[in-house]
Image (tube, rainbow, N blue to C red):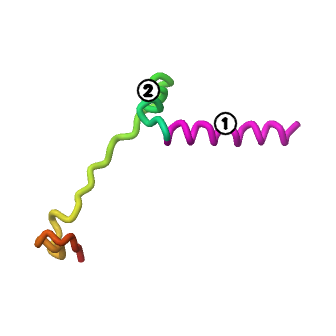
Amino acid sequence: MIEIAVALLIVCAAAIYWYARLFPAGWSKVRTTVGLSAPQPTIGKGCGGCSGCDRSGKGGCH
């Protein structure tokens, strides 16, 4: 009986994982409906402020 419960938990976790990966907009709606906070998007700094960047347009950094 424990094996069935563990297998069911693994299948449910995999289903939730893939739903979140394949349908991020739907997953955000589900999270807000349940009351969980949605993750905040991160804004990358890039290489704008570092002195080791290649600003010639060739795309090299450090």
Q: Nearer the viewer, residue 14 or 9?
A: 14
Residue 53, position as x, y percentages in the image: 17, 73
Q: Quadrant of the N terminus?
A: top right
Residue type of the residue flagged with mark 2: Lys
The image shows residue 31, relative to residue 22, as above or below, that is: above
Identify the secondary structure beneath mark 2.
helix
Residue 50, position as x, y percentages in the image: 17, 69
Residue 19, position as x, y percentages in the image: 54, 36
Which residue bears the numbered disc 2? 29
Q: Is residue 24 found inside the magenta-colored segment of the image?
A: no
Badges 2 and 1: C-beta atoms under 8 Å apart? no
The image shows residue 14, relative to residue 62, as above or below, that is: above
Q: Quadrant of residue 12?
A: top right
Which residue bears the numbered disc 1? 12
Residue 45, position as x, y percentages in the image: 23, 58
Label 2 neighbour load within 10 Å: few <14, some 14-19, many 20+:
few
**In the image, what residue occupies the spot 56% across and 41% down?**
18
Which disc, if any, is residue 27? none
Instruction: State which region is magenta.
Output: 1-21
> Which residue occupies the extreme left position in the image?
56
Q: Quadrant of residue 4?
A: top right
Residue at mark 2 to residue at mark 1: CA–CA distance: 19 Å
Sequence-earlier tag: 2 or 1: 1
Identify the secondary structure beneath mark 1.
helix
**In the image, what residue occupies the spot 24% across and 77% down?**
62
> Which residue occupies the extreme top position in the image?
33
Q: Taking 45 as reference, is 51 left or right?
A: left
Q: Taking 53 as reference, is 11 left or right?
A: right
Residue type of the residue flagged with mark 1: Cys
**In the image, what residue occupies the spot 31% across and 48% down?**
42
**In the image, what residue occupies the spot 12% across and 70% down?**
55
